[in-house]
Amino acid sequence: MTKFTVLLIHITLLSTVGMKKIQFVLAGSSRGMLLLLSLAIVIVSCSVIGGVNKKQFTFYRNEKLVKLVILLPKGRVEERFRVGSDDGKEQFYDFNDGAVFYIARNTTWPTVNQHRMVQPDMKRSSSSGLTSGTDNNGLYWKEIRLEEFQIGYAYVPATHVNRFDDALNSIRIKQ
């Protein structure tokens, strides 16, 4: 009869949000336990080093709570809000390098990129509701329209554009 052992591993991770405690319970033979332990370490490493920061924009649609979920680029992010009448709401995520990511819904005020959308060097795709360009400092900006939302970023250096585009592509609406 094979001896079974149970190993309890507590891994405490420090993230930008706070402390997270993850426990794994591994059971099996010594060889199987080693394999499971290796797999657990790989899973934890990938989830911690993934380079994303999950955020939610909550709102009501037809009297039901709905969430727009987005995976922002990893980094120190400060979150701020602007709220207006008629359920107008805008969430901003300010990054250390000066970049801003925003989500707006039913706003009566201009978005961060509104004034840029009339400049001659901007790119517009009417079929996808996407508008983009660079500002006078060579920093990138983009805004998309998705249902009743205006979502975009501004003041992004060329080296980070892919990360912000990935964030735009990660958007999911959960009802």
Image (tube, rainbow, N blue to C red):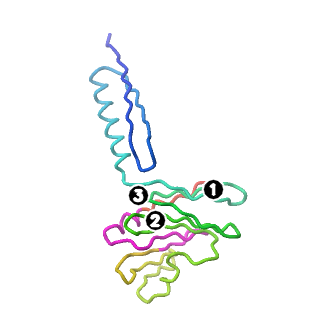
- Earlier sequence position, callout 3 versus callout 1: 1
Circle 3: residue type: Arg
Q: Which mark is residue 66?
A: 1
Residue 66, percent from left and from top: 63, 56
Residue 117 belongs to magenta span: no
Q: Which residues are magenta?
A: 143-166
- The answer for how far apart the CA atoms under marks 2 and 3 are is 8 Å
User: In which quadrant will I find the N terminus?
Assistant: top left
Q: Say left or right for 62 vs 140.
A: right
Residue wearing tag 3? 76
- In this view, the residue in front, 75 or 72, is 75
Q: Provide the secondary structure element on which disc 3 rests.
A: loop
Q: Provide the secondary structure element on which disc 1 rests.
A: strand
Residue 145, percent from left and from top: 54, 72
- Report the residue at 36% width, 23% height from top: 7
Circle 2: residue type: Asp
Outermost residue on the bottom side: it is: 120
- In this view, the residue in front, 171 or 79, is 79
- The answer for how far apart the CA atoms under marks 3 and 1 are is 26 Å
Residue wearing tag 2? 94
Residue 155, percent from left and from top: 41, 73
- Report the residue at 43% width, 75% height from top: 141
Total marks placed: 3
How crowded is the residue under tag 1: few (<14 C-alpha within 10 Å), some, or many (20+)?
some
Residue 163 belongs to magenta span: yes
